[in-house]
Amino acid sequence: MRPASLLVASLALAITVLSGPAAARRHDPEKLPVTRIRDLHYGDVLFYLYQGDDFEAITRLTAYQHWNLIPHHEDEGQLLLGGLYLSLGMHNEAGERFQTLLTQDVPTGVRNRAWFYLAEVWYARGYLDKAEDALRRIQGKLSPELEAQKDHLYANVLMYQGKFDEAIRLLVMWKGSPSWSAYARFNLGVALVRQKRLADADPFLTAVGTMYPETPEMLALKDRANLALGFAELQADQPAKAKAALERVRLNGPYSNKALLGTGWADAALGDYKAALNPWMELRGRNLLDAAVQESMLAVPYAFGKLSAAAQSAEYYETAVQSYDAETVRLDDAITRIRSGSLLEQVISSEKDSHYGWFWQLKNIPEAPESRYLYTVLAGHDFQEGLKNYRDLVYMAHTLDKWGDSMEAFGDMIDTRERAYAQRLPRVDSLLASGAVEKLAQRKTDLESRVNGIDGDKDVAALGSPEERDQWARLQRVEAALAAAPDDPERAELKDRLRLVKGVLYFRLNDSFRARMWQQRRTIKDLDLALHEAENRWIRVERARQSVPTNNGEFAARVAALKGRIDGLQTHLAAAEQKQSDYLGQVAVAELEQQKDRLSTYQVQARFALATMYDRAANPETEKKDQPAPGQPGDDTPAPQQGVPTGAPGAGDAPAPQPQSGGDTPPPGPKP
């Protein structure tokens, strides 16, 4: 579970304190109490929350609060909304809610984690004073992992504010894990170098640079610390110390190119140009995209010139000029592609399946010609933060497009409803005018009166089956015929037989009369219920006859208003997206322009060196007369620009990312 989801899940589950603060205070502050969902719509919000769909959760939560559909979770909803805002990077909205709702009634562990994650967002956004205030609100101790992160974050906040003495005291007294301690000491050492306090920075960077790394990440940090210390010593004109630090960097690592360059300059500063050629020649055969390799193409002929090998020096200078010219052309092509906007489209498409929000980070570099020049800027904090904003703007634009399509669908639904209403209206009016319900009620009354009459008269034949009623009618006709016939012995016998048959049939009818009468009365009760339901539906139809046109009008007005809002937001969002795209393009182009300027400087130096050498070759007598010994004062062979290459750790290095695989995102704490 992502850190943001962990936080909002904690907020969602732990707010039973609002209905039982005393019980919550007795609860373990690092564990979450059990909550009971009392509103169905709040459970719907939590469903999307635990699916990781924070945007859908925040949309539904806001809508349900607007329509007052979660009355039993109003305060919980506000606090959960703050956590959702935080996960989306909306730190101001999250901070306002936290300051209002994160009171003593909220469990300590949940409150501390909320302030910690809020401090991380504010720190990333550059609000250092707010980040420090949020960290000071944390009471007691967090879990060991979060406690280490908190101290590391606190130290970085203090360093960025220039409070180095406080940061030093915090780190000296800190008893965190070795990995976190290494990152904290590295950041402090770099910050002290930036403040021209190399003597204070040396112990911190040396400690990191001489540690025994247990993971590849720590090994990279060790190389970076040695590189930063080595270049700082070079700038302080201490080449022997610089060489010792730089030689601790791996030969085949992410910082090996810059270390080789620095080692060569340390040897050159010590006057050993032959030794300097060893790392520079190794470096010269590597990828020209690296700034250190570009500088080595000048350093090698410079060293040959110092060793009085003019032919080799001129050859390498000419090769450098050709390489710089070709690379400049490729840089121009890359700048043109970036200005066309294709870079951001490729970045977004390469990360289309990853999550949006503040905790998202670029993981994959797009396959594009210009990407190879932009590893530094794409990995930089400013570009990453700007890219998060741009990606969220794109996501919002797609969401508004879908909502706009939904408004069109709602409009079609209303039109369909109005057409159906118009088609059915004549039938409805005819039915309402027919009085069908009143007629059915009268028929039911007549039927009930007839049943009561049958019961009162004990007319057993009336409730017989159709066959029994037919037999009873035939017996009555035969009886009437015998009564009209003259008396004789044969008629008397027929009467006796008729009386016997009639008695049997009457017995059967009378035996089942009560049961059949009960069934009839039950049927009448069912008719009462059906008639009552028909009357209710009749009333609803009459009301719908009057309300449907009004409802359709209200729905149409709401849909039109929402469509207007969406259109306005789309226009505003498109403008913001374009501005952010332009900004990121400017950042990327500025990086490439800096590389072009560096190549241009190298070209000027190479051409000037060649011109100087050709001039000496054309005037050998003057050269023999005036040229001092190589490396001595007065030697006018131009040296390449020395210093920290672009992107190399050194005096301008920013604090390192936090020690974990997967980027700068804080590792998740305990799952709720």
Image: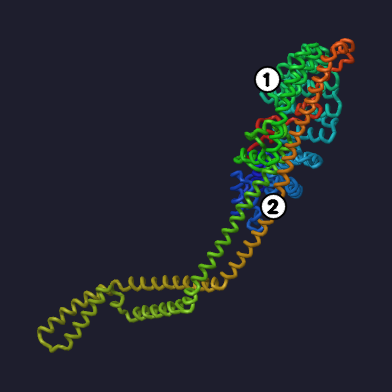
Nearest to the eye among marks 2 and 1: give it: 1
Out of 467 and 649, give the one closest to the viewer. 649
Viewport quadrant of the C terminus: top right
Number of the label disc, if any, that sits on residue 667 = none
Out of 591 and 420, give the one closest to the viewer. 591
Residue at (16%, 85%) from the top-left corner? 482
Q: Is residue 528 visible?
A: yes
Measuring from the top left, give residue 28's x and y in whole percent.
Answer: 68, 40
**Picture quadrant of residue 546:** bottom right
User: Regarding mark 1 in the picture, which secondary structure is present there?
Assistant: loop
In the image, taking residue 402 as reference, residue 472 lies left or right, namely: left
Q: Residue furthest left?
A: 489
Q: Indicate the amino acid at tag 1.
A: Asn
Residue at (66%, 40%) from the top-left corner? 342
Q: Say which residue label 2 marks.
A: 75
Residue at (60%, 58%) from the top-left corner? 407
**Picture quadrant of residue 241:** top right
